[in-house]
Amino acid sequence: RSTSLNNLASAVKTQFQLGRLPDLKEAVFLLREALDLNPPGHPDCSLSLNNLANALRAQFVQLGRMPDLEEAISLHREALYLTPPGHRDRSLSLNNLANAVMTQFQQLGRMSDLDEAISLHREALDLTPPGHPNHLGYLNNLASAAMTQFVLLGRMLDLEQAMSIYTQAYAVHSHNGHPHVIHVLQGIACCLINRDIQSGQNISDQAWENFELASDYIYADLATRLESTVNWTRAARLYQHKSSPCAYRKALLLLEQCLTIFPTPELQHNFFQTVQGKSELASDAVSWAIQSGELQEAVEVWEQGRGILWSKMRDYRYPIEQLRIQNAVLAEQFEIITQQLDQLTTTYNTESDALDSRVLEKQLTKKRKLNERWNGIVKEIQSVPGYETFLTIPSFSSIRRVASEGPVILVNISHHRSDALILYSVDSDPIHVPLPDTSKGTVFDTVGWLAEGLKLGCLSNDPAESSSQAHDDACKDETIHAVLSHIWKYIVCHIFQKLNELGFAKNSRIWWCLSGKLCTLPIHAAQPFKEHTDPEQQLSQRFIHSYTSTLGSLIRAREGIIAKERGTAPKILAMATSSLEKVYEEIQAMQDVGCDIQKLLGNEVTHSTMIDNLAKSPWIHFASHGHLDAKQPFKSSFELHDKAMFTILDLLKAHLPDAELAFLSACHTAAVDQDNTPDEGISLAAGMQFCGFRGVVGTLWAMDDHIGPILAKEFYARMLHPDNQNKPIDFKDAAKVLKAVTKKMRKNEDLKALHCWVPLVHIGA
């Protein structure tokens, strides 16, 4: 039974590598039970001790609980005691204890821990001669510890020792395709950089060549290659090396490839958050290109890295599904080999596996063949008409057409610098608008204010969650006023000035494409709030604003539109739950202005009716509560009958060939998580856009119930009865109509408060 428990725990722990923390907790539980069945004296006791200790250390890394690490070290010491000199597993126990003690050093900074870790690593290495399957792993561990000692103490002897060990490791193992060679290459690069800096020389080209070799090392798993390449971007940026653009490009491409391993959007999102440096990778890459004066490249990198989670659902799921129609065999081969590569990558671990050299060589040979086949299949896919750009970087020439109907403004906030790029013509280069260096701090401050207002209930309409003061309109508007003023001063006023210089007329359409935490802010409503300001010179009044998650999604929203000469109103699917007080008034208001409605009300609004009817309706109106799930944004949802939830993941399953306009009269439909935004916005409204709706109206935060009927009446009256009576009804008028409605709201004493109209946004074409 103990063997079965260990095997099950090993499988569950492997599954944890896909990002599910409950799997790791289950593995710890199973390994405790296995250890209980292998008491001291049992031949497998030391193995059970090691397995449980490794799982606890992994749990410490995830949760940061010191008792987990302390117990892991204690168990490793007990395991080492049970493997005296001469025992076949002694090197394994020495290495595991050294790793755990090293983790404790990184946490507490005690030199005694570092000294002990180095001593244990040396002893483990002495017991594993060249040819032993763990020899390279132990060399890496010892060299890494020596580098840590150099960084702390500045002794050149430690640096020379680390360089000597890495050089030895490369000489012995570079030819066999061992996955750990990537750490050797990265280690040599770091040693060379430190050596040249210490001696006052220019950093040798060899250092950067080793970083690139590590990035391209196909025998390492994708996640390790990504981590290594992110380290390359940091070093190249720090020392202003010319390899920076290459490093950023490779890192973003590896990030895309990594996401193919994870089978669900939730796991992709979890992975996105776990690797340090990924969340700002795209923004940093764009900032470097702008700093270098390469504005076209900046736009290409922007689109490569923006909305990368959404892109994987389109660029992998949908094209592969479409490819399956054209070439089912090729699509299936791609999926199978991707899964096999991932499975093979996660089976080798020097902390728990005692593979002999024949087994290791067999695995490495298999992986080499699979890598070669994977690269071949990607090339085959790229030869299929329509798939030429599969897993390639979008070109500026294909992206610039996004400006065919008006300027698109990219706002990039990075630790290094902050900028805006304006795409204003299909045949011109982008216009660069530098932003103040304080922009990033200001963005984080304003997001913090807005988030705090949400948490305190200042922007909530739920009496159970807020004090009476929090519900006061003045309290709400005070927060919004501060947010809008700061975004104007540090970001928007500079862009507004440039748009005026470029001569864009009043009521021109403009699109905002934002990064990271900017997605949480109402950029469209930013204003200085100065006395005697001409309202027509305010950003919100001068232009017609829309947002887009990515440039590609806006291009797709405009493509393939079949002109519909509508003399009458289109059929609108109106779905409403009874959880909102004014919901039936809202539906009645739509009918009063001539909407041709198919109604789903109350208990009719279920998961199955949503799926069945979404695909049949070019326009939909959804009146219900919207819920933002901060920890798992893909589980953000609309509330259905009986508190059931229709999530973003459910939306992604829908096939919507004729979708045009979605009006989401629900709280938080365009909101994104302020704390865990991975350089892109994941919201219900964005989900509707990526699922096929060409235009979406949503809200950034909770909207008061009484606004719904008024907003619906004004919006649809203008949509169905355009000013130009000869103009056909067109979903693309939604942004213009929304502006007209909010302008009217601002003149209404009951609706002019900022919290009433500021959260209303349009997304898409």
Image (cartoon, rainbow, N blue to C red):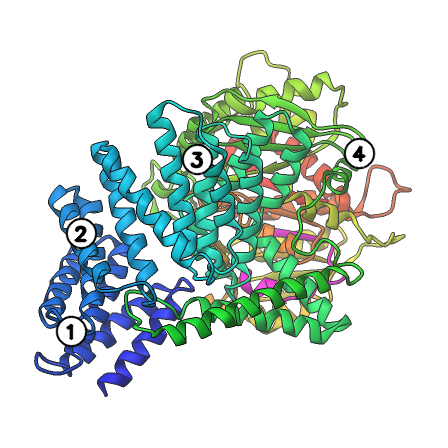
Asked if the magenta segment contains residue 398, the reply would be no
- Label 3 vs 1, first from the N-terminus: 1
Q: Is the residue under label 1 in contact with that under label 3 (CB below 8 Å)?
A: no
Give the residue at mark 2: 117
Give the residue at mark 3: 235
Q: Quadrant of the C terminus?
A: top right
What amino acid does circle 2 point to?
A: Ala
- Label 3 vs 2, first from the N-terminus: 2
- Decide if residue 670 is on the left or right side of residue 563: left
For marks 1 and 2, give the CA distance. 20 Å
For marks 4 and 1, give the CA distance. 71 Å
Which residue occupies the foreground of this view, 614 or 501? 501
Which residue occupies the foreground of this view, 434 or 506? 434
- Label 3 vs 4, first from the N-terminus: 3
Give the residue at mark 4: 426
User: Picture coordinates of residue 635 (x, y %)?
Assistant: 48, 60
User: Picture coordinates of residue 176 (x, y %)?
Assistant: 46, 63
Q: Residue at x 54, y 24 (%)?
A: 491
Quarter of the image for residue 319 reads bottom right
What amino acid does circle 1 point to?
A: His
Q: Secondary structure at mark 3?
A: helix
For marks 3 and 2, give the CA distance. 27 Å
What amino acid does circle 3 point to?
A: Ala
For marks 4 and 2, give the CA distance. 60 Å
- Decide if residue 330 is on the left or right side of residue 622: right
The label on residue 87 is 1
Q: Is label 3 or label 4 in front?
A: 3
The label on residue 534 is none
Q: Is label 4 or label 2 in front?
A: 2
User: Picture coordinates of residue 441 (x, y %)?
Assistant: 42, 27
